[in-house]
Image (cartoon, rainbow, N blue to C red):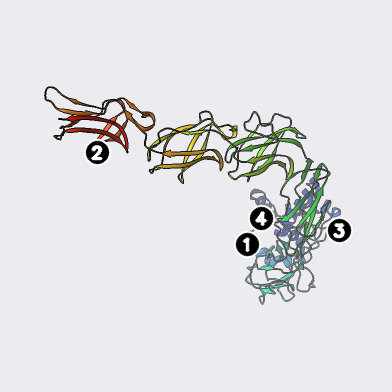
Amino acid sequence: MKRAFLSVFFVCVVAILWACDMGAVEAKGLEDEMALLNYGEFNEDGMANLIPDAMAACNEDPECVAAMEKAAGNGELILSSSEAQEEGTSSAADTTAKGSSSSAQKGPVIPSSSSIKADTSSVVSSSSAVNPGSSTTVASSSSKSTTPIVNGICSPTPNSVERGGSTIWKYVAINSTVTIESYDWTFDEGSSITTSKDATPSVSYAAKGSYGAMVVINKGLATEKEVKCQSKVEVTGIKVSGCTCTTPSTSVVVSSSKPKDVTWSVSGCTGAEPFTYAWAGGASGTGTSASMTLKSVGTYAPTVTITNSDGMTMSPTCNSVSASELPGAACNVGEHNYDANKTSMSVVPGQTFYFRPNNVTGVTGTISMTLTGGGSSKTVSVANGSNNSATELTASTDLGAYPYTLSVDGEEVCSANVTVEYPTLTTTCSWGTPVMPGASVQFNMNKCSGWTDAMGDNATMVLTLDGKTTNLTVSRWNGYSGKITVPDELGAYNYTVTYGGKEVCTGSVTTAYPAITSTSCALTEHSWDHTHYFTPGANFGNWDANVIGASLNMTLYHDNEEVADKAVSRYSNGDWYQYTPSTETGTHVFRLDFHGNTVCEVEYEVE
């Protein structure tokens, strides 16, 4: 019954696929080999009678009909233990008894004219010959009719691997009611192992080729079977993979006078080393890199084939490079955005200026160009025409001449020259008078000539006096006016004002005490108490309060003997000094002194 059902099942499937033309035929799989094991090779001539005869035989057998209904219900072919036992013990007798009657046979009826081969090796009596070359299960000549049948095939999964890879060999039992108790595998020479007793051994292969195997099932038992695996494992070379072919830039500019060399490189390859590289498509090279000289506008890409030691190849797609004509432009500079139209200019160290590409030709839309100069580099967007925006730049702090170059893909488009230097300035400088030692004295600079826009509105200049330096913030429009501390000692001192090491103004300053005079010093006597006073008065000469201040310390002498230090004010009568007239007869003198210079003298007589 079971064999009849399998006949119907497999034959129907084959018939349906053939009749419906379901597309390309897949490679032979495990199910195909199972069908071939039981029913032999099929062809179109036998299909017409094979299906009706098999169905008719199954319909006459209640067990076959029940099994077909069960398979249709849940997609499984299930035999009960009694069915399996009956199938195993009676198959030999049934074959002998029913072999000549198509109406009683539990299997497909094969017409004698059909080219479809029946499975003559599934069940063979003790007198039957054994075909040692068949991969189907054949009963041993010593087996009795009551010995259960061990039927099956073996094959590798996968059936194709790379050198160094492994596959799993597996034996699949067909129509068997026997418990498989042992496996005894033998593998072709070149396999990583020669024998194994595992049910599903893993075998690897170090060299290319085709490798087979065989297995003995239940070795030494009454159910022992030897099966030679029809399918072999095909071991191929290790594939080349992971290769990429790239170039640093996918766009270049060229001209007939300036061709461009472009290099492509292959990287990332994995596989059986070493690799060889075959370049074509205009590129010249034998290793991982190849170059092409581009002289005209166009799109270029080489081809490369990488071959490993196993003879396996890979041809990655190389990046294409677009070559365009070198554009033209005029490079201009200026102090401001609006006047960046000079081919050269001078700037002050560290000052800002502007760069602008004008009269641009050969540009489609907007492209990026590289601007280099002054030790720096930046990318600017450039459009066709003459109204490109100016880029603000900062000049180097080091003196010197600097070209500012605009380029595309390393090719110069245009250049402008910028010289970093200090301009020559001139002005006049003066000091407030008098210049007293150690005093904070007024220093004045007039507006400088030679001032440039690049300097801005203010510049730092250096005043050197008596070996000491003072930084001055000088205005472009107002010059400088401020207090400067002069040396503590009397004398003449040279001074210099410089800008960037260049002289702006120079001269000398003499420190001295002013010869202050007064005509209003007086001696008074109050009538109510006859008290005597000395007053400095307020009428002073040679006293510039804006330069030397509104108050000075002066010394009062009586008959050349110091009697008091007085704080004298430029704008008032100052301190009163109370004194008692001398008791000595004769002329006595009060003298007001400022650093050795007599401000005024007042006499009085004692009789």
The alpha-carbon separation of the residues under discs 1 and 4 comes to 15 Å
Q: Which residue is mark 3?
A: 115
Q: With 255 as the anchor, is 605 left or right in this view?
A: left
Residues tagged 2 and 1 counted as in contact (Cβ below 8 A): no
Image quarter of the C terminus: top left
Where in the figure is residue 424, as x and y percent of width and height?
A: 60, 37
Q: Position of residue 395 (x, y in %)?
A: 60, 40
Disc 1, SS: helix
Three-letter amino acid code at disc 4? Leu
Query: Dot 3 lies on which element?
Result: loop
Mark 2 or mark 1: name the one nearer the start of the chain.
1
Residue 110 higher or lower than 452, as above or below: below
Q: Nearer the viewer, residue 447 or 278?
A: 447
In the displayed structure image, the side of residue 464 where residue 572 appears, left or right: left
1 or 4: tag closer to the N-terminus? 4
User: Marks 1 and 4: CB-CB under 8 Å?
Assistant: no
294 and 157: which one is in front?
294
233 vs 594, left or right, is right
Gap between marks 4 and 3 measured at Cα: 28 Å
Three-letter code for the amino acid on which mark 2 is drawn: Asn
How far apart marks 1 and 3 lie (CA) works out to: 35 Å
Indicate the quadrant where residue 168 lies.
bottom right
Real-space Cα separation, disc 4 to disc 2, in angstroms: 147 Å
Q: For the point 61% across and 35% down, which residue is it?
A: 353
Q: Which mark is residue 77?
A: 4
Tell me: residue 225, above or below residue 5: below
Looking at marks 4 and 2 on the same chain, the residue that comes earlier in the sequence is marked by 4
Where residue 77 sits: x, y (%)?
66, 55
